[in-house]
Amino acid sequence: MVTEAEAKQIFTDSIHFDSLIVAKWSPETFAALHASGITGASCTISIWEDFKQSIKQVVQWKRWFEEHEGIIVQAYTAQDVRRAKSQGKTAILLSWQNTAGIEDQLDYLRVFHELGVRKMQLTYNTQNYSGAGYTELNDSGLTGFGREVVDEMAKLGMIVDLSHLCTEKGGYVGINCFGPHMPKGNDSTIDDYVAALDYTIALCGEDHVGIGSDNADGHKRPSAFMDWANKDKGYARRSTPWGTSAKVVKPLGPLENRPELPVAMARAGWSEEKIKKVLGENWLRYMETIIGS
């Protein structure tokens, strides 16, 4: 049985990777991310942005890596994440939640890969050149172009973000902490989040589950960003109600609360090995499989 004190030490010593953060990026957020004890994070830098706008996002991040080199560093490989841990920095994996940024040009994938973008979700809620998002009434799946995108990403060594298709292939499922999606809704606590992890582990096995919090620190609800994110292409029909919701509880809380997660895991009877796997080792194994060490 892991004690609370032992759980805190495990968190300090282990790698914790959050495979989905969409916070409002700023010097304050970088400082909070670093202080949280999170070793590495997959940070969303593009949702509805087109090619030119997505390039601008990468340029901004390159500038941030220079300006805040003491606490954040760009990660290209799993080894970069491990190195960040040893250096006391937070590794950032540049990621997209949509393929809008490549428009209908397959070769644009190579450009972004060379710039360090390593993970892309194929669609975000609605239809794009690659396929149908989950809110489309007519789920047409991948388009022909979308199949080419998947093939090209595999060749380049980029992670295709499809969270529910991967256990049989040795993949990874990152569990978010979006209260309205949980059984207790906005009354959910961190213990309910750990229960959701356990539920998924029962389905997929403890080697395939990790943390993909969908943390959105700095973005208020409602806000212009949330309204933009929850409209088709950022301006058209509303695809979900969450952009205008005044209250959405995320039971992991703000970044500063992250050290409480392993304590909740210990409270649920988790072993040290299981805690380490879900905190980050499962992600690193998966990252090494797709991208390389």
Image (cartoon, helix red, strand yellow):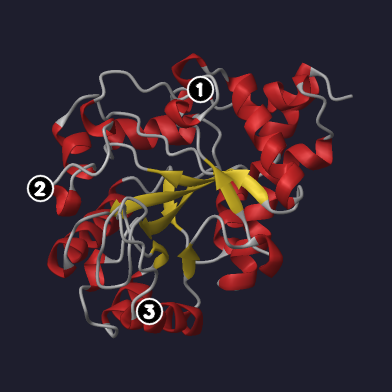
Which residue bears the numbered disc 1?
251
Instruction: Indicate the amino acid at tag 1.
Output: Pro
Q: Which of 6 and 191 is in front in this view?
A: 191
Q: Is residue 219 above or below residue 44?
A: above
Q: Is residue 237 visible?
A: yes
Instruction: Indicate the amino acid at tag 3.
Output: Val
Q: What element carries label 1?
A: loop
Which residue bears the numbered disc 3?
149
Place residue 264 in its image quadrant.
Answer: top right
With 115 as the anchor, is 288 left or right in this view?
right
**Residue 129 location (% of width, % of height):** 25, 72
> Would you call the spot at circle 3 few (<14 residues within 10 Å), some (14-19), or many (20 or more)?
many
First reached walking from the N terminus: tag 1 or tag 2: 2
First reached walking from the N terminus: tag 1 or tag 3: 3
Query: Which numbered tag is attached to residue 10?
Result: none
Which residue bears the numbered disc 2?
235
Q: Is residue 75 above or below residue 104?
A: above
Q: Which residue is drawn at 24% across and 65% down?
A: 100
**Residue 184 location (% of width, % of height):** 53, 19
Task: Work out which quarter of the rendered image holds the N terminus and state it.
Answer: top right
Q: Which of 22 and 255 is in front in this view?
A: 22
